[in-house]
Each structure stands twice: as structure tokens, then as C-alpha cells.
Image (cartoon, helix red, strand yellow):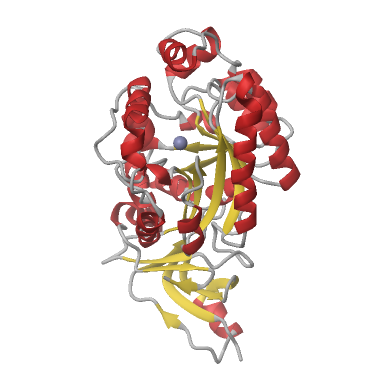
Amino acid sequence: LKSYKIYRSDYALVCNDSFDIIKDACIVFDKNIIDIDTFENISKKYPNENIDYQGTNSVIMPGLINPHVHLEFSKNKTTLEYGNFISWLNSVIANREELIEGVDSKFLQIVLKKILKTGTTCIGAVSSYGFEFDACKKSPVKTVIFSEVIGSKAAMCDMLFDDFSQRVEQSIKLKDDKFIPAIAIHSPYSVHPILIKRALQKANDNDFVVSAHFMESSDEKEWLYKSSGNFKPFFENFLNQSNSLQTPEEFLNIFDNTKNCSFVHSVNASKEHLEKIKSKNHSIITCPVSNRVLTNSKLNIDNCDNINLAIATDGLSSNFSLSMFDELRSALMIHENKEPNDFAKELLKMATINGAKVLNLNNGSLETNKSADFLVCDFDSLLNENSIALMTILHTKYPKKVLIDGVEF
Ligand SMILES: [Zn+2]
């Protein structure tokens, strides 16, 4: 008894590095992709099989990967202040209790259902408390769960590390193919170097992927280099701390011997920081909407050549949507200097294969032996191959079908 299926579509966006498009494509899959080729070749190779045509102007593409989201802030709509990082941070602190109230497993299951419906098959969820574990475990969406460590006081390091370790151990107990433990370092301004070293040791010991916010605002840059600027009153008032813990260079150096690291935002990273990130094969995750609304800034993508660059929504604490298609549409508009058709292809790679590299997962492109995590989209008409990526981003709100490990949800 065979257990595989064959779908035929007018086009398949492979989302490999060269952004290949297969016209009149067939994908043979069970849990994994067994074969992908033209209808002509597949129908010869599998002569007696039932081939399920997905319709005129159908497009098959990999499921989207959102490698950086804070689910705990999923209740926020209009509570937080935007436009300035410190004002935002103060509004988060002032409204924290209210924001996380009612963010329980049941609520997060609904959030994850929406994420799935909008074509995201895989997320990297940053977790401060662990209260999204249950919802992520129950969802078909594949979750890399980043237990986050934060704390700048040397005297608190032992206590904070113990708390962090407990959350990591809890995630390890729940580990399966769709729930993968990982580690997040909050940022260079908020985590003591001792704590970072101990957390990275844990990541190295367990082969976890690692992520950290980095150079999100110009205030962060000023604080890290000069211990001055808008961060200063914040640190003095809340933490009785008047000097930065480390420079960005010292921070990046700590990650030298850790594999699979990604740095989120990096909009204020210098050419030297980007060189360092590239030389260590680390990745960058850009969150265009979050950067636009919090600090009115954007990553200079042209400076990120040869760095693995992924795209994410960040949390609803700094976005209006957790749909990756919404994020891709926004990214097209925010990066107004990029040629739309070519940039759309780059964006789809950022949202698929590059995200898979960040999370170290075996998906993100339609290639043999990868997980059968893919979408079927359909359109009224399709002009030509060159415009498919752009049209897919502009016109997909909900894909017609979303499959994870070959199962339709
Ligand atoms: Zn974030």
C-alpha cells in the first residue's frame, strides 16, 4: 500500500538559493517531499498514479517560517506607545500585567490557528515565562521555542540562570519533532556577560540554536558605546546601573564558538559588526514593521550581502499582524528603493529557506527529502514567471491549502 500523494500545480516556487520556478509542476510527498519535477517527468516516472491537480493558476510554495515572535504579547493592539524605543519600553513595563492577563493556553491556541491559516508552518517563539509551551505543543505549527535569559546584575546571575535553566529543562522534557528547544539572549544591554556565557554553554552542550536582539535602536548603540543617551535614565531608575555592561564587539565575541546564532533587528549594526556576523556564519532576522513603528528605522539590506537574512513579524507588541504575508507586503513598501519583482523573490527566500537555516530545520524549500511543509495558493490569472513572487506576496491573504509534514490543516 502506497502512502504518498501527488499534487500538480501550474507553478512551483522551489525557494532554493537560485529561486527556481517549475512550470506545470508535480510534487510527490508523504511526510517528506519524495520528488518534485515537471508533470511530464513525474507522469512518466509514476505512470499509474492518481495526480491531484490544484487548479488553474495554482502555485505551490514552501510554508512560511516566522523565526522571531513573542506570543506572550499577542493581546496587544493599541496599548503600547510607538515612535521611540524607550517610550515603548516604558509603556511595556507600565502595562505588562494588563497585557499578559488572559494570555493562556486557550487564547494562544487561537493565535496559533490564525498563524497557520495565514500560511506560516513554522515559528521561532521567544519565551520569557514558558506559558506558551502548552499551546505550541498542541498546535500543528512547528515551534522552535527560545527560552530567554535576561538580567544585567552580576549578583543576580546565579538566581536568574537557575530560573532560566528550569524553563529550558521543561522545554527539553516536551521536545518532539514539532517542539524544539532553543535559547534566546535578550540583548547586549540587558544580559550580563557571565549569564550569556553560561547560557551559550548550555546551547553548545545541547546543540540548540541561539538568537539575540542586537542593535535595535540608536539609543541602544549610544548606551553600549558611551553609557549615555535615553537608556541612561532608564537604567539608573529601574536598575540602579549607570554603565553599559559591554560594547557590541564584546557582546558579539561571546558568540564566536556557538553555531546557528541569529541576531534580530541589527538596524544599527556597523559594517564591522556585519562583517563579524558574516565571518562567523551567523544569521540576521529583520522585522521591518517592528523597526518602522518602534524606531522609524530599517535594516540596510544591501549591507547584508552573503549573510543569511530571514524575516519575522516580532510580537504584536510591535506589529498589527502575525501573518507573514502581511509582513512581506509591508517589507515591500518599507524597502522602497528595491526593484519590486526581484525584491519579492528575495523576500520569499527570506521567509522560507533562510528562516529554515536560522531555525536549523529540514524545510523551507521544495526539495527532495525535505519536510512536506507547503502551501497551495491560487490566483485569477498569472502573467509570467517573473511576476509570480510579487503577485504571491501582494495577493495572498490565506493560502488555499496549508500542509505540514504532508498533512493538510
Ligand atoms: Zn523581539
Nearer-the-camera pick, 301 or 288: 288
What residue is at 52 percent from the left and 23 percent from the top?
269
Q: Is residue 403 above or below residue 92?
A: below
Image quarter of residue 82: top left
User: In which quadrant is the N terminus drawn?
Assistant: bottom right
What residue is at 31 percent from the left and 38 percent from the top?
98
Percent coordinates x, y for residue 215 in the rendering: 50, 24
Is residue 278 visible to the viewer in this orientation of the structure? yes
Q: Is residue 160 above or below residue 272?
A: below
Residue 248 located left or right of residue 237:
right
Percent coordinates x, y for residue 43 in the rendering: 54, 83
What residue is at 61 percent from the left and 16 percent from the top?
246
Residue 36 located left or right of residue 51:
right
What residue is at 36 percent from the left and 25 percent from the top?
295
Percent coordinates x, y for residue 18 in the rendering: 55, 52
| Number of numbered labels in the structure image | 0
Nearer-the-camera pick, 316 or 300: 316
Percent coordinates x, y for residue 352 in the rendering: 50, 53
Image quarter of residue 92: top left
Image quarter of residue 174: bottom right
User: In which quadrant is the C terminus drawn?
Assistant: bottom left
Is residue 335 visible to the viewer in this orientation of the structure? no
